[in-house]
Image (cartoon, grey):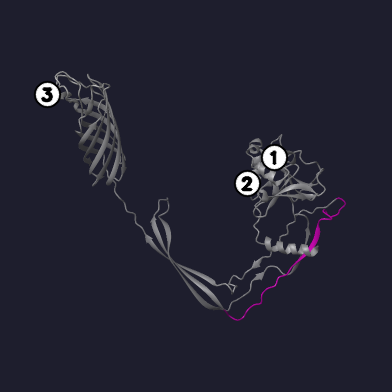
Amino acid sequence: MRPLILLILVIFCSAVYAQKPCYQHSRLYIFNKHDEPRLFTDPLGRRPQFPFLQRMNGITTAELFIKSIQDSAQRKKYSRTFPAFDLLLRNSGFAHGYKDLSIKNVKKVYITPGTIGNLGFYNKEQNVINYLYVKLNPAGEAAEGVEAWKLINKDGCFLYILFTCGNAFYPNGEAVVAAPGGETAGVGCCKTVTVKSSIVTAPSQTDSVKRLAILRMNFYRAYLTPSHQKGRKNDTTVELIRTKDTLIHFKDRLVVPAKLDSSSRYKVYSVCRDSLVQLHIGLIGDSLVQTDTVHPVYYVMADTAFDKKEPKFVNGCDNHWEISIEAGKSYNSIPRFDDPTEHSQSNGPQFTATLEISRMLTHWFQLGLSGSYVVLSYQDDVNYPGSTPGTYNTIYLGKPIIPIQFFGKFNFGKEVGFQSSVSISFGYSIPTNGKIESGNTVLTTNPNLKGDFTAGLKFGVAYYFSCHVGLGASFTGQYFNNKSDLFIYSLYALPIQAGFHFRF
């Protein structure tokens, strides 16, 4: 039996040497060395710390353990104790709390009666979760020991959740456990073993050895730019431009072996169930020379060229007003008659023009006033007094109709260069020179169109040659809500225009 335990210790020594320290930031892991452990002989389950993990609630397998903590209903039901369980896991090296637990992290074990450690409890009346320093020997447990779930994180660190009550427990590995009668606790399951650590150093070499050296040259370019942070003059960004590696050989006569901080010694351990033996042997390397003659020596040299970037300031355009003049053609919608004997049709495109004056509040938004020249006309075959039967009459509702509007204009793009815009306008339309023509004859019937509300949506694109002059084109949808002696009109005009823009 003893040779087997010695073999296990050797394996532990090699594996545990590189093991990270356990992340233990909970009251569960703090032991007061000056306190005597309280003998705990009460049955478990009177003050369950995590009741959703109790045996009486059906948690009898690792699968049911995982299912319980992943059940959202459990988290809602135990709104006080479940967050405490999740926080305990995070403070025990489970970075994502209960989400890091799976079946492979949960193991059913038995804790030896008489084990000293911290035992958790929940005082429901005072709503307090705390820990007692106890000698664990509860009544009513199995002959093998106190049943528990062992939760093991990725670094091999662990804690216990007792099977019966769902309370956390962590043993004090430095405590001396004495059973009743003065005998060592755990007789029959604990063994005392002796481990000898032997330190064998390599002999010093007096002759020189041939060693490899890898020389690397890194070339960097650094950019210095004016800093926007208060108190700093420049910001530096570094870019690796080129790397050059060279392999050389040299004679090394200063080969000194490494030293150890320990000589041969004996250590005595008491090995029980779930024992962990750690053997740390510190190395002291020679700070003056590199002692490994097998691996090459690495030297890295760096050369950095600094390129100072001076900022280039671009002066913005300081304009406050804009005047634009545009002209083109306009199409308008036509009324439809609910009469099989009367028809209407388009009169084709008509001349249109627009004058806009606006105040530039910023380079991307301006407010202004506009006036437009728009012809509203269409043709129909209605039998007006004096019209020629069987021919189409030309109806001019406004020749022109003049919409006077306020508008807001949003600009997108560069102040010098291409720029697009969207304008929203509303105002009042003034119709003039309304008439009906049949052939070359002006009929006595007059449309007599009345002024009314108008609104428009305009899309434009322009190219500014400088801060002050540009050419542009636009497309507008203009709505007219006018009444006449003939009909109540709701017509749309669609002017397509091009023109000049002047800013100052």
The Cα atoms of the two marked residues, 3 and 1, are separated by 98 Å
Amino acid beneath label 1 = Phe
Asked whether disc 2 touches disc 3, contact meaning CB atoms under 8 Å apart, the reply is no
Please tell me how many numbered marks the rendered image carries: 3
Residue 503: x and y, percent?
Answer: 23, 41
Say what amino acid the circle numbered 3 marks. Thr
Asked if the stretch drawn in magenta spans residue 230, the answer is: no
| Image quarter of residue 367 | top left
Disc number lying in front (1 or 2): 1
Determine the residue located farthest toward the left in the rendered image.
440
Question: Quick check: 411 left or right of 213?
Answer: left
Which quadrant of the figure contains the N terminus?
bottom right
Q: Is residue 140 above or below residue 454?
A: below
Q: Earlier in the sequence, mark 3 or mark 1?
A: 1
Q: Is disc 1 in contact with disc 2, using a CB cutoff of under 8 Å?
A: no
Please provide the residue range marked out in magenta.
Answer: 180-209
Compute the Cα span from label 2 to label 3.
Answer: 93 Å
Secondary structure of the residue carrying tag 2 is helix
Q: Is residue 481 at all visible to an observer of this figure?
A: no
Check the picture and name the quadrant holding the C terminus.
Answer: top left
Question: Mark 1 or mark 2, which has the lower sequence index?
Answer: 1
Q: Is residue 499 above or below residue 398?
A: below
Q: Residue at x 34, y 54 (%)?
A: 311
Q: Report which residue position mark 1 lands on.
A: 52
State the mark number for residue 441: 3
Q: 152 or 490: which is nearer to us?
A: 490
The residue under label 2 is: 97
Q: Nearer the viewer, residue 97 or 175?
A: 97
